[in-house]
Image (spheres, rainbow, N blue to C red):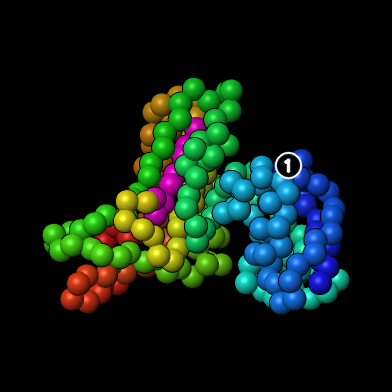
């Protein structure tokens, strides 16, 4: 089947304004992105922050496509920075490049990683995060906006959902500001507010069972 693809803003500059893709019958939105990124590899790092639309309405990555559908790929719209959830690896270096403007003399990065043991010392064999995605995305944007307003900073924050391999990033916060004090304080504010306000839960799996808890609890 053939679908029509559109991209906007940064994504358009990295690829093409419009094109057609030939996909297998029953292909989903993710398959269209994969095919487009194969033609334009510069798109690949942006996948965690992109939203998709099908025939003029927001769509999920697993939504099936039909012949002659139009698929649009949309870059982040909140302040131009990456703020949201992803079910794949977090590209911390890409976040740092995004917020490091010439006017910023300080850049502070915090990465929360999946640990191989719980607070009580039990070995963790697998870690999973589950979120209320629409509410979590809005709350992350609100937290980042509060930090930017209070400290004159630029914030990028991404939290991972689903299974997170041990040792990989579960959350990344990058803050750029004119001076180091503001960057440190804004970054700390964001992670503490995430612990308090974000509707996201962590399940630690052990050899003898599993346990749900709030991150940071």
Quadrant containing the C terminus in the rendered view: bottom left
Seen in the picture, residue 143 relative to 27 is either above or below; the reply is above
Quadrant containing the N terminus in the rendered view: bottom right
**What segment carries the magenta color?**
169-176
Prevalent SS, magenta region: strand
Q: Secondary structure at mark 1?
A: helix
213 horizontally vs 55: left or right: left
Q: Residue at x 39, y 28 (%)?
A: 181
Residue 170 part of the magenta segment: yes
Where residue 90 appears, as percent x and y from the top left, is 48, 49
Q: Residue at x 55, y 60 (%)?
A: 138
Task: Identify which residue, 125 or 115, lies in the foreground.
Answer: 125
Q: Quadrant of residue 108?
A: top left
Task: Identify which residue, 171 or 2, lies in the foreground.
Answer: 2
Seen in the picture, residue 66 relative to 114 is either above or below; the reply is below
Q: Residue at x 47, y 42 (%)?
A: 92
Seen in the picture, residue 216 relative to 10 is either above or below; the reply is below
Where residue 172 appears, as percent x and y from the top left, is 43, 47
118 horizontally vs 161: left or right: left
Residue on which disc 1 sits: 14
Task: Identify which residue, 196 or 49, lies in the foreground.
Answer: 49
């Amino acid at each position: 089947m053939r679908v029509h693809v559109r991209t906007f803003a940064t994504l358009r500059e990295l690829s093409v304004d419009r094109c057609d893709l030939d996909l297998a019958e029953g292909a989903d939105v993710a398959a269209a992105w994969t095919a487009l990124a194969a033609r334009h590899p510069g798109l690949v790092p942006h996948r965690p922050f992109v939203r998709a639309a099908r025939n003029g309405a927001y769509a999920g990555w697993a939504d099936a496509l039909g012949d002659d559908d139009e698929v649009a790929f949309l870059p982040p719209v909140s302040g131009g920075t990456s703020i949201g959830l992803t079910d794949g690896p977090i590209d911390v270096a890409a976040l740092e490049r995004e917020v490091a403007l010439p006017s910023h003399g300080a850049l502070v990065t915090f990465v929360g990683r999946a640990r191989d043991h719980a607070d009580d010392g039990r070995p963790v064999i697998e870690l999973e995060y589950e979120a209320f995605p629409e509410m979590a995305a809005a709350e992350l944007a609100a937290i980042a906006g509060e930090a930017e307003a209070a400290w004159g900073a630029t914030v990028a924050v991404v939290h991972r959902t689903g299974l997170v391999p041990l040792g990989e990033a579960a959350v990344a916060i990058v803050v750029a500001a004119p001076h180091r004090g503001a960057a440190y304080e804004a970054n700390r504010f964001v992670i503490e507010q995430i612990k308090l306000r974000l509707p996201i839960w962590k399940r630690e799996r052990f050899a003898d069972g599993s346990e749900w808890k709030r991150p940071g609890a």
